[in-house]
Image (cartoon, rainbow, N blue to C red):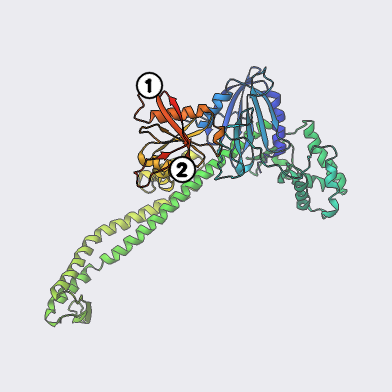
Amino acid sequence: MRTFDSLTLRACVDELNAVLVGGQIQEVRQPNEREILLGIRNRGVNYLLLLSAHPQFARAHLTLKRPPNPPIPPTFCMTLRKHVEGLRLLKLRQLDFDRVLFLEIGFPADEFPSATLIGEFMGKHSNLVLVTPEGTILDAIHRVSHRINRVRQLLPGQPYQLPPPQPDRADPFAPQAVEKIVRELGSIPPNDVEGLASALMQIYAGLSPFLSREIAMRALNYEDRAQGLRIAWTSLFDAAAQQDYRPTLFLSDVGTPIGTYPFPSVQWPENQQKPMESLQLALDQAYTFLVEQNERESQRANIRARIERAIATWQKRLAGAKKALEEAEKADFYRQNGELILANLWRIQPNMSNIIVEDFYDPDLKPRSIPLDPHRTPQENAESWFQRYRKAKAAREQEAQRLAQAESALHRLESALVELAQLGTPEAMRELSEELASQGLLPKEGIERARTEEPEFEGHKIRRYFSPEGYEVLVGETATANDYLTTRVAHPNDIWLHVRAGVSAHVVIRTHGQPERVPRSVIEFAARLCAQHSKQKHAALVPVDYTLRKYVRRPRGAPPGAADYWNERTIEITP
């Protein structure tokens, strides 16, 4: 259910503006790759504002939970600390009736904000973006390159573009907005909740499936559908316009939170709805449980998949051990074949591929057919059977041990699957996983991940830096890495740098197709890295050439790392 839609965001903005505007941002935390926490002090009270770009749980609200910071702050966190820490939260506003939140940040005396933190809460496309007053992206918590989205890139140095608007949709808060859907009622069958909900989403901007269905179900409670729509509209949109919210927590059959909304819902049993004193408290309570539940079930699914893969591996080992043991059990048969050949040497003629002899190991002395290699002598044929006998005899005990080991491992892994389904905490699941790994029944998780993840830059030693302005700078650390960076990684309009008339790393500034927008300070930053990765790094002044990547070529027949370039400019830098 969850339901963090446009109406929930509007209610959040109203509540947050009442308590946060004018507060100082004293702390920036990024506990994971998708969430930011802003510590804000206002009127003597400390608040913790959570902004999440999680693909399933994107949201914004105050929280009481303070997760630990990672040992090394992520790049986006460092950018936020540089640009917003110590400043004031001037205003929170919603983009029209969409799931986009603007946090305007600056000094109290300033007319305009010095930075804007934008939260886009749009499912798998959710993001948090820090933007300058001129509309240039400083950084995004999830960078979107042209490989992911050719239309709308979210990268440092790029101009920020708003998410695409919904065309031809009416504002549900406009005066007489409800009359648009009233005029469409004739084309919608009576009591068709889904049809009415679908029509609502087609006519109005920002209506989620949950909200559309809520309006439809409220309206169809009345015999006069037009009157029912007007009453439903007033109970939601007019109340929201007047900030007359009634925050409600929705509960499951067993009393656990499954979502929250600014108003009670006719879509859920009344006895499973709990009124809350604030939407912030309801959101924090609901999402704390839902996120922890999701993490717990994700961890359970991950460990279950690892156990199932291990079971498949041990089943193959078991089948292999059984087959090898069956072969080993034929050891006496192989020895008998060799002895029967030696007892019948006189009967074997050249180029024979088979011989039938009287089997004196059989009580009834039945004939036995023994295959022969026509290219070997009778004695060599006998010796080949004795070799198979010795090999099978040696393997018999070893394969029996392997068989017992595989059976024991499978029994433990299958019981672990049952045990895993009953565990209720991530710690207990982790302990089970570690126990199985210590027993050699599961590969260690880090090793398994290393096998599945491809190394960045195909394993070439290329180091990534970010300038204070947020531009990505790549530095090759070996000759082959330099060659790979220049010929395979850099784009034609990226800026390429190299120490003039010397040996140095190849350095590339990502320009995203707009080299003319790259500030000189970024070129100086990259040139300093180039000088520091050269044989002239101890010189007082180092000349560094820079040009566009499209003006760089590797000479024919030259070794990796060699390059010719033209249309260059030179900058002198102190390493």
Q: Of marks 2 and 1, which one's residue comes earlier in the chain?
A: 2
Q: Is residue 479 above or below residue 342?
A: above
Q: Residues within 10 Å of mark 1 (few under 14, many from 20)?
A: few
Q: Nearer the viewer, residue 363 or 99?
A: 99
Q: Nearer the viewer, residue 360 or 323?
A: 323
Percent x, y for residue 460? Answer: 39, 42
Percent x, y for residue 382? Answer: 16, 72
Percent x, y for residue 426? Answer: 49, 40
Q: Residue at x 35, y 39 (%)?
A: 479
Residue 79 visible in the displayed image = yes
Q: Is residue 416 above or below residue 396?
A: above
Which residue occupies the extreme front position in the image? 567
Q: Residue at x 60, y 34 (%)?
A: 128
Q: Nearer the viewer, residue 458 or 215?
A: 458
Q: Where does label 1 land, which residue?
A: 540
Q: Which image quadrant is residue 123 in?
A: top right
Tag 1's secondary structure? loop
Q: Is residue 252 above or below residue 383?
A: above
Q: Is residue 427 left or right of residue 85?
A: left
Disc 1 marks a residue whose amino acid type is Ala
Q: Which mark is residue 4?
A: none
Q: Where does label 2 land, which residue?
A: 489
Q: Which image quadrant is residue 122 in?
A: top right
Disc 2 marks a residue whose amino acid type is Val
Instruction: Tell whether label 1 touches label 2 (CB within 8 Å).
Output: no
On the rendered image, what quadrant is the N terminus found in?
A: top right
